[in-house]
Image (cartoon, helix red, strand yellow):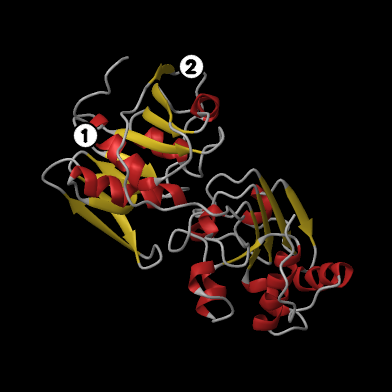
Amino acid sequence: MTALPEGAPIAVVVVRDGVLPLGADETVAEAGGTALLVGTDPGTAVAELTGARTVWCAENGAFTPARWASQLAPVLAASGPILLPASPDGRDLAPRLAAAMDRPLLAGAVRVMESGAEVVRWGGRVAVELTCEGPFVATFQPGVRGVESSSRTPRIVELFLPDAGPALDATTIAITGPDPATADLAEAPRILAAGAGLGRGELPGPDAVALLRAVAGHLGASLGATRVVTDAGWASYERQIGTTGVVVTAELYVAFGISGAAQHLGGLGDPRHVVSVNLDPSCPMTMMADLGIVADAPAMLEELAKRLGVSAGEEQVLHG
């Protein structure tokens, strides 16, 4: 067994059934390509990492954060900064690991240095640089860094964690999928986003956004918005996408009436598919889209809602 590197940063990633959490690749890249994958079938998950250089894989059964923290603490004792993705499991394990190792926890990091990290607060609208005298544990926000693709094959090392004694621990009763209506936009796979153009139809702006929210829920997608929309009060600020809002990494991003200001485009990360609905075929959003639909966004939204049979008052969210 090869020892973990001393004094260097390392990413710790919780793996469930061979599946990486959101933000794992970025976290590993921020740690310089060194990672410890722990959980069920971590060896399968290695293939999904594009920025890894050396990966330790530890098969450790079902996720129990207190037990895992006590097992990982002695193994990681000589490591430098420890980074975990700010996924649900990462946010569960990080504070327990920090407490077990007597290290400070820097939650919500968007940039990690040797002596600390830049973290975001107030829904991403404020950035603060925190410094530490020694090594620390940090959770790294998804969608803020990006990862360069590489054909390099990482070195894989099997790791066996020490046994842990009985401890009071969390028990998983069931795992349910996120509700698109309330899910963190940074983790949403599908987003329908509202721009100022939605307020120029027959429906007032707030009603148009409410209708888009209902359509998004029917399609299993989340509602997003530009700063103009949130400043107008048509959507809450946690729905705001951009450099002054949330950075997203959606597989599908559909923009209704969004021209594509630089601040908004800066929050799109690297979506797999972008669809733009706008009357201006030359606006930045349509120019960058995989599919540009030159049409009146409010009218198209109303027609889509009619065909789906939904209205602005619909509360039910359909999954699938």
| Residue 258 picture location, percent across and down | 64, 64
Residue at the extreme left of the image, as rendered? 133
Q: In this view of the protein, which residue sits in the foreground, 116 or 99?
A: 99
Residue bearing the label numbered 1: 80
Q: Nearer the viewer, residue 109 or 77?
A: 77
* Residue drawn 69% across the image and 74% down it: 198
Viewer-side residue, 23 vs 257: 23
Residue occupied by mark 2:
153
Q: Earlier in the sequence, mark 2 or mark 1?
A: 1
SS label for mark 1: loop
**Type of residue at label 2?**
Thr
* Horizontal side of residue 228 vs 276, given as left or right: left
Q: Position of residue 286 (x, y in %)?
A: 69, 54
- Label 2 secondary element: loop
What is the distance, in whole Å, between disc 2 and disc 1 at their CAs?
24 Å
* Residue occupying the point 41% across, 50% down: 86
Percent of width and height locating residue 314: 75, 77
**Residue 313 appears left or right of 178:** right
Q: Quadrant of the N terminus?
A: top left
**The C terminus, quarter of image:** bottom right
Where is 221 relative to 21, above or below?
below
**Is residue 140 in sight in this rendering?**
no
Q: Is residue 281 left or right of residue 120?
A: right
Tell me which amino acid carries mark 1: Gly
Residue at (44%, 48%) from the top-left corner? Answer: 89
Circles 2, 1 touching at the beta carbon (< 8 Å): no
Q: Is residue 181 placed above or below 291 in the rendered structure?
A: below
